[in-house]
Amino acid sequence: MKWLWLITVLIAVTAAASLEHQTSIQANPPRTIIVQVLNGKTGKPIKGEAPNIWIGNVKDPVNPRTDSKGEIALEIGQAQPAEIRVMGNYYMDCRRRENQELMMNVRYSLTEIIAKGVVSENGCGQSRTNPIPGKLILYMRPMTFKEKWDS
């Protein structure tokens, strides 16, 4: 009889611990955003671009490749500060700025991306899309011969 009682207590404790673990996992689900790279002239997705992406205060960028929709899914976790920087690798940003070094320092709020979505300026053409919550949309253009040569 003591064994039966002991086994019942062990099963109850194990079940309670398992339930608590599952609840804590669900309470902090991974936070993911989408970065989409579009051609500023055509508005079409750029496939195969590997932009430099800095999340939070990391020193070295990650370089995932865009899929056929021009998208990259990024797990942002609890990045601090809650910001992201993105700079094209084979493409140039369509915002109207001369110095590409400054482009590396443009920071986007992760909180704003998650809540409302963010769309960058498009100085390369007429294409424009509306923000989508959870998505950062960037307009880029192919590098010119001179830009490729200089980099």
Image (cartoon, grey):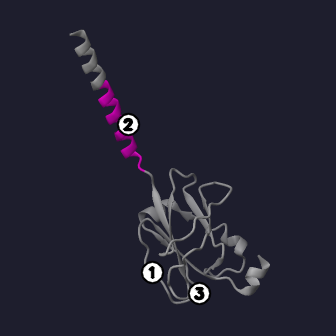
What amino acid does circle 3 point to? Cys
Magenta span contains residue 68: no
* Res 117 label: none
Q: Specify the segment rendered in magenta.
A: 13-29
Q: Which residue is mark 3?
A: 124
Give residue 140's position: percent from left, percent from top. Answer: 59, 80
Specify whether residue 28 is painted magenta: yes
**Which of these two is toward me, 80 or 91?**
91
* Main secondary structure found in the magenta portion: helix
Snapshot quadrant of residue 20: top left
Residue 60 sits above or below residue 128 on the image: above
Front disc: 1 or 2: 2
Residue farthest right in this picture:
150
State the image quarter where residue 150 is shown.
bottom right
Q: Which residue is mark 1?
A: 129
Q: Residues within 10 Å of mark 2 (few under 14, many from 20)?
A: few
Q: Amino acid at mark 2?
A: His
